[in-house]
Amino acid sequence: MTDIDREERIRIRAHEIWERGGRREGEEKDNWEQARREIEMEEEDAAGLKDAVTETIGLAVGQEPEEPQPGAQHSQEPAEGSRETVKKQLARKKKQVG
């Protein structure tokens, strides 16, 4: 995504926030900041999803998961899914760390 595309998404989101907030004047900077934060979170979520899908597809075709880089931070987010899925995720993380 180019910076122009990103700015346009932020502008549109800020306008939506302004409309939802009752079209109050004088809150442009706050609306813009909120929109910027929301777009950044969406981009981070999309990047994380892309990594997860890429790893899952790799595992499905028999590729080994990538080794974590030295000093890499592991997610502190809770695991999601069924109990069995969570167990598999935790086991995979333990293998990567150990």
Image (tube, rainbow, N blue to C red):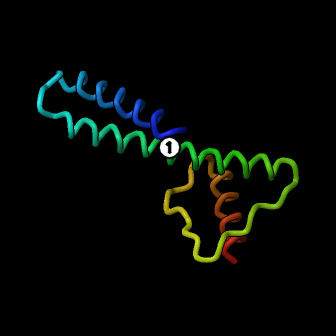
* Position in image of residue 37 (x %, y %): 35, 44
Q: Position of residue 94 (x, y in %)?
A: 67, 71
The foreground one among 89 and 55 is 55
On the image, the x and y values in percent for residue 80 come to: 57, 49
**Quarter of the C terminus within the rendering:** bottom right
Residue at image location 28% in from the left, 37% down from the top: 32
In screen coordinates, is 38 left or right of 56?
left
* Residue at x 12% of width, y 27% of height: 25
Foreground pick, 8 / 15: 8
Task: Give the quarter of the figure containing the N terminus.
Answer: top right
Secondary structure category for the residue under label 1: helix
Q: Residues within 10 Å of mark 1 (few under 14, many from 20)?
A: some
Residue 12 to residue 73: above or below: above
Q: Is residue 93 above or below residue 2?
A: below
In this view, the residue in front, 80 or 25, is 25
Is 81 rendered above or below residue 4?
Answer: below
Task: Give the quarter of the image for residue 65.
Answer: bottom right
Q: Quadrant of residue 33?
A: top left
Q: Which residue is mark 1?
A: 43
Q: Going by the image, does 67 lie left or right of 1?
A: right
Residue occupying the far right of the picture: 62
Snapshot quadrant of residue 11: top left
| Residue found at x 74% / y 63% | 66
* x and y percentages locating residue 9 in the rendered image: 42, 31
Amino acid type shown at disc 1? Glu
Q: So how many labels did they put on this image? A: 1
